[in-house]
Structures are given as C-alpha cells and as structure tokens.
Image: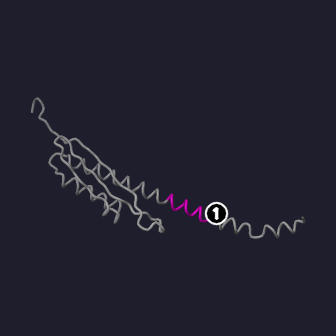
Amino acid sequence: MQPADWRRLERGTATLETALSFPIILLIAVGLVQFAIYWHAQDVVTTAVQDGARVAASDGRSLADGVSYAQTLLTAGLGPSAQGVQLKAVDGGDAVSVTAQGQLRLIIPWAADARLPLGAQAIVSKEKFRAGPNG
C-alpha cells in the first residue's frame, strides 16, 4: 500500500478515539467529584457529633446545648444537605453520647434519587470538678 492509502484509512481515527474515550473520562471525573463531596460530608458529620458531645459533656451544659451546637456545625458545613441528618443525644450518667444518621444525595444526574449513608457517633465523659485537698 502507498502512504496516501494509509492516510485515507486513518482519516477520522482521532475523532473516533476521542468520542469513545470522552464519556469514560467524564464518568471518572464525576465519580471523583462525588467521592470528594461524600468525604467532606462525612467529615463534617463526624466533627459536628464530636464537638456536640464535647459541649453536652461540659459542666453546666445540657444535651440540648450539645445537639444545638452540632446542628449549627452541620448546617454551616453541609448547607441544605444538613436537613437529611438527624441528631440524637443520650445521657449515660458518666458519659454523653451524640449520634448522627442521615443520607447524602448524589450529584450524578442519571441516578434519580440515589443516596449515600452518613453517620457518626461520639461518646465523651462528663466533666467533673472536685475540690482539692485544701479547697
């Protein structure tokens, strides 16, 4: 075959390769963005629960204070997605437990109502102040 024949056979190959690879690259990019959003949301939930439990376990504070603080952190970190996360606090006597359960909607447009689970639990010992031997 002559070089001119090869050129004629290869015409449009780059366009075909691009058309085949672009959807795969786009799918990978959307998947990476979704993973980053999920990782961030889970980190916000974990941090909110830990800080809420810390506030609730503080001397002179209540479970409602801890839940309110955790809800504030969730709203600041997740925005409207925070409405899908429920908080629950339990006083166990010597410790306070704050639990969060919820779901995060996917950003992928073709997954109609798919959701990822979010959840965390923190248990913090209550603060106890004791008078020292001289006080």
Residue 32 or 127: which is nearer the viewer? 32
Above or below: residue 94 compared with residue 89: above
Prevailing SS of the magenta stretch? helix
123 or 5: nearer the viewer: 5
Along the line of sight, the residue nearer the viewer: 7 or 60? 7
Spot the residue most to the left: 135
Q: Is residue 110 positioned above or below 101 on the image?
A: below
Q: Write the start and end of the magenta stretch as one range.
A: 21-32
Residue linked to disc 1: 21
Q: Position of residue 99 (x, y in %)?
A: 27, 51
Q: Where is residue 124 in the image (x, y as percent from the top left)?
A: 24, 43
Residue 39 position within the rendered picture, expressed as x and y whole percent measured from the top left = 42, 54
Percent coordinates x, y for residue 30 in the rendering: 51, 62
Residue shown at 25% from the left, 51% from the top: 52
Instruction: Give the secondary structure at mark 1.
Output: helix
55 sits to left or right of 109: left
Q: In this view, does 98 lie above or below 81?
A: above
